[in-house]
Image (cartoon, rainbow, N blue to C red):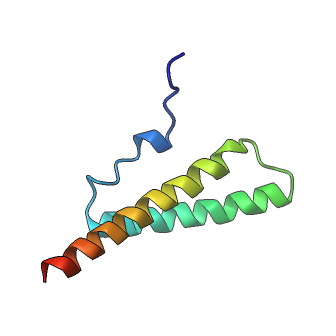
Amino acid sequence: MAKKETKSSKLDVAGKSDDQLNETLGELKREAFNLRFQAATSQLEKPSRVREVRRDIARIKTQQSTRAKAASAAK
């Protein structure tokens, strides 16, 4: 069975600049906030999106941490 591609699997974290990562992180945090409200009011259409957003946020934070460690090691 082939793995189904989702929006989160298309998120190219490594190819983005630091500013782009910060912008994307802000957008994802806003989306996570809205999804939590939708879940609380039973209006959530796609429950799996909550998981995808959380994982995308984690991917970005991991990339930012890796870059910060590499920058501090290069100094």
Give left or right: position of 50 versus 60: right
Q: Is residue 26 above or below residue 8?
A: below
| Quadrant containing the N terminus in the rendered view | top right
Q: Residue at x 39, y 69 (%)?
A: 22
39 relative to 46, above or below: below
Q: Position of residue 49 (x, y in %)?
A: 64, 46
Which sits in the foreground, 71 or 44? 71
| Residue 68 location, quadrant | bottom left
Q: Nearer the viewer, residue 3 or 18?
A: 3
Which residue reaches farthest front? Answer: 73
Q: Position of residue 65 (x, y in %)?
A: 36, 71
User: Measured along the vertical axis of the image, is residue 13 above or below residue 71?
Assistant: above
Residue at far left of view: 75
Which corner quadrant holds the C terminus?
bottom left
**Point 28% across, 75% down: residue:** 69
Q: How many marks?
A: 0
Residue closest to the far top = 1
Residue at position x 71%, y 41% from top?
A: 46
* Horizontal arrangement in the rendering, residue 16 relative to residue 59 (left or right): left
Q: x%, y% of residue 61?
A: 43, 66
> Could you tell me residue 13's position as x and y percent?
34, 54
> Could you tell me which residue is drawn at 73 percent across and 61 percent down?
36
Left or right: 3, with 18 as reference point: right
